Image (cartoon, rainbow, N blue to C red):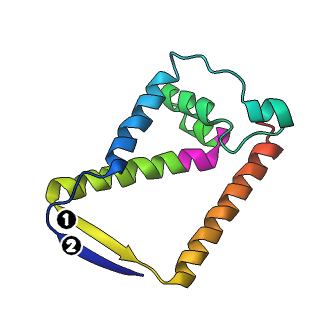
């Protein structure tokens, strides 16, 4: 894996926008009642994002352990997206960009780990009967 620092002005990344969308969604979950998940209603199994709303509500209540128990992968993804978006904002403000290049074998390993994480998270949700 190689990193390259590029100086100069770059456009504001979409990740910065996602950070505000994520913050907004966390606030909205308190005021909008959500219906049952259609996937869960049809199949009887939790969907991949099952527990995300309850995790957001636990976050707003300050229950960080409970938040991770509802759907660990969604929580970790949202935390990662928040910090990545914050990093993109810093890149925009200070006018630099870090470019990462990786070999095809390394990229394949990262993709396989992502698939394994999704399957493990879904198995967790099924076992915990979410």
* Percent of width and height locating residue 31: 51, 15
Quadrant position of residue 10: bottom left
Q: Residue at x 51, y 32 (%)?
A: 59
Q: Residues within 10 Å of mark 2 (few under 14, many from 20)?
A: few
Q: Residues within 10 Å of mark 1 (few under 14, many from 20)?
A: some
Quadrant position of residue 23: top left
- Residue ID for mark 2: 6
Assign the magenta stretch its main secondary structure: helix
Secondary element at image label 2: strand
- 1 and 2 marks in contact (CB < 8 Å): yes
Quadrant position of residue 101: bottom left
Q: Residue at x 54, y 17 (%)?
A: 32
- The residue segment tinted magenta is 69-76
* Percent of width and height locating residue 95: 16, 60
Q: Is residue 30 magenta?
A: no
* Percent of width and height locating residue 18: 39, 43
The first of marks 1 and 2 along the sequence is 2
Residue 34, placed above or below residue 25: above
Q: Is residue 75 magenta?
A: yes
Mark 1 to mark 2 CA distance (whole Å): 6 Å
- Residue ID for mark 1: 96
């Amino acid at each position: 894996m190689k990193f390259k620092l590029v100086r100069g002005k770059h456009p504001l990344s979409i990740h910065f926008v996602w950070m505000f969308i994520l913050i907004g969604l966390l606030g909205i979950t308190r005021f909008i009642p959500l219906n049952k998940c259609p996937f869960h209603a049809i199949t009887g199994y939790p969907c991949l994002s099952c527990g995300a709303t309850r995790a957001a509500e636990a976050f707003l209540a300050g229950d960080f352990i409970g938040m991770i128990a509802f759907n660990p992968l969604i929580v970790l993804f949202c935390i990662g997206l928040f910090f990545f978006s914050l990093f993109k904002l810093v890149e925009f403000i200070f006018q630099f960009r870090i470019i990462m290049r990786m070999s095809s074998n390394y990229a394949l390993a990262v993709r396989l780990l992502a698939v394994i994480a999704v399957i493990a998270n879904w198995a967790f949700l099924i076992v915990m009967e979410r």
